Amino acid sequence: AQSVTQPDIHITVSEGASLELRCNYSYGATPYLFWYVQSPGQGLQLLLKYFSGDTLVQGIKGFEAEFKRSQSSFNLRKPSVHWSDAAEYFCAVGAADTGKLIFGQGTTLQVKP
Amino acid sequence: GAVVSQHPSRVICKSGTSVKIECRSLDFQATTMFWYRQFPKQSLMLMATSNEGSKATYEQGVEKDKFLINHASLTLSTLTVTSAHPEDSSFYICSARDPKGYNSPLHFGNGTRLTVT
């Protein structure tokens, strides 16, 4: 079955500290992977995506993610977190040609001053 | 860049009434749009795929007679929650993909917060 798991429901980091949000997936075909961010009451903004090629993907706002096929993972990282990064983060997997996505449960990021 | 507009952003309605939510692609034509539902503190669940000029495709467990989807043009899809009940209160988000962009990502609307009293 196709699924996405974000093991961490809630993460708190200090401003300026590094961040890693975990994402594991189960998908029958070659996965297309996405990370989205959602501020309270808002829609989703795409941070980055992986389709093929270089397994280290750079995104907006200083985020990056690494696709590791052997581990079925697509973890999101940021070297130095800013207070404005506090939000809900969703990992998603799907078929880019159809647009249907399966979302993980989400990880709430809290940033301490 | 491509933008998807969703309206209204918030709506409160009484139990038993119907509510229509609009999803528009502003600068591209979307033959396919998607409707998601998000309960508080939970993830997004795909409800249905809206296809321009044809019937929507609903995910398992989604009542098609309750959640009516119309995709009458290449830039507009509507979701109508019929005979709404308090359990229908949720955050509804639409998305669309610009078909001209190979491997282009989905563009999401800002969502509609529906509260049924």
Image (cartoon, rainbow, N blue to C red):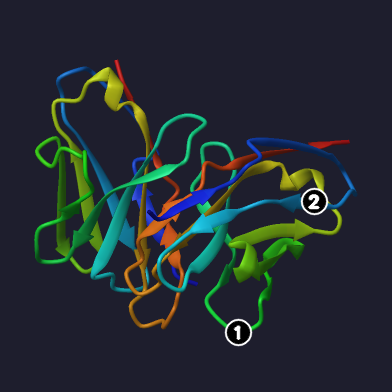
2 or 1: tag closer to the N-terminus: 2
Q: What chain does mark 2 sit on?
A: A
Eyeballing the image, is B2 above or below A78?
Answer: below
Q: Give the CA separation, mark 2 to mark 1.
A: 24 Å
Residue at the spot of label 2: A19
Q: What chain does mark 1 sit on?
A: A
Residue at the spot of label 1: A53
Quick one: A91 or B19, which is closer to the camera? A91
Which residue reaches farthest front?
A70
Mark 2: secondary structure: strand
Q: How far across and how far down the image is residue B8, in percent?
A: 34, 41
Residue at image position (35%, 83%) is B100
Q: Are marks 2 and 1 in contact (CB under 8 Å)?
A: no
- Please tell me the numbered disc located at residue A25: none
Quick one: B2 or A27, which is closer to the camera? A27
For residue B63, what is the image quadrant?
Answer: top left
Mark 1: secondary structure: loop
Eyeballing the image, is A64 above or below B102?
Answer: above
Eyeballing the image, is B115 above or below B66?
Answer: above
Q: How far across and how far down the image is residue B114, in percent?
A: 34, 30
Quadrant of the image containing the C terminus of chain A: top right
Residue A74 appears in the picture as rendered: yes
Residue at image position (66%, 76%) is A55
Amino acid at dot 1: Gly
Report the side of B79 relative to B107 (left or right): left
How dense is the environment of label 1, judged by Cα within 10 Å: few (below 14), some, or many (20 and up)?
Answer: few
Residue B114 appears in the picture as rendered: no
Amino acid at dot 2: Leu
Q: How far across and how far down the image is residue B32, in percent?
A: 25, 66
Q: How far across and how far down the image is residue B94, in percent?
A: 35, 52
